[in-house]
Amino acid sequence: MGPTRAPDHALVHLRRARDHVDRHYAEPLDLGQLAAVASLSKYHFHRLFTATYGRTPAEHLTERRIERAQDLLRATNLTVTEVCMAVGYSSLGSFSASFNRVVGESPSAFQRRYGGDAPRIPGCHLFMAGLVERRSASGEKLPSGSAS
């Protein structure tokens, strides 16, 4: 059985990687990148992160993306596909499956249930303010003024 928590000297490195995920959740992130942010090997990082936070780095990234998706589905008039892309997924199927697994219902059902009658933030304002980035179907950022 592994450690129940990382040693104190490693916690600062794990926090740095966790904060990186929290800030850059919409970008493609992999274990190697996060381990590099933490200045640890991939395997040591994965083992210590999981022991310390009780979930893998991938699970933490998924939870962060789904939390942000819930916010966008509640408060904006973005489509489910736009939300999917805005939170870092490149596949609507993967996004819907992850959302359903974490939340217990589909993104569209969640949006219908919790979107309510409150005024919603137009998607164009979110894109113009840089709060979400418009991406192409391949996941590449589109130039700011592009209407694809």
Image (cartoon, grey):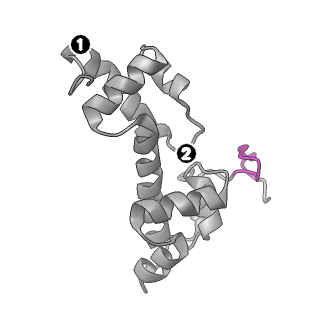
Residue at the (40%, 21%) spot, across then down:
45
Residue at the (45%, 78%) spot, across then down:
115
Q: Indicate the secondary structure of the residue bearing disc 1.
A: helix
Residue at the (32%, 24%) spot, across then down:
48
Estimate the x, y position of residue 146 in percent, counting from the top left. 78, 53
The amino acid sitting under disc 2 is Ala
Estimate the x, y position of residue 75 in percent, counting from the top left. 45, 70
Give the distance between the C-alpha atoms of the residues marked 2 and 1, in whole angstroms: 29 Å
State whether residue 62 is above or below residue 104: above
**Extreme residue toward the front, this view:** 1
State whether residue 33 is above or below residue 60: above
Q: In this view, does 96 lie to the left or right of 146?
A: left
State whether residue 111 is above or below residue 89: below
Q: Give the range drawn in magenta.
A: 135-145
Estimate the x, y position of residue 17 in percent, counting from the top left. 40, 27
Write down the residue under mark 2.
Answer: 26
Estimate the x, y position of residue 25 in percent, counting from the top left. 50, 43
Q: Secondary structure of the magenta portion, mostly?
A: loop
Q: Indicate the secondary structure of the residue bearing disc 2.
A: loop
Q: Is residue 136 magenta?
A: yes
**Comes first in the chain, label 2 or label 1:** 1
Does the CB distance between marks 2 and 1 fall below 8 Å?
no
The amino acid sitting under disc 1 is His
* Category of crowding for the residue at label 2, using alpha-carbon neighbours closer than 10 angstroms: few (below 14), some (14–19), many (at least 20): many
Q: Please indicate, yes or no, whether residue 43 appears anywhere in the rendered image.
A: yes
**Along the line of sight, the residue nearer the viewer: 61 or 79:** 61
The C terminus sits in image quarter: bottom right
Image disc number at residue 9: 1
Q: Please indicate, yes or no, whether residue 127 appears anywhere in the rendered image.
A: no
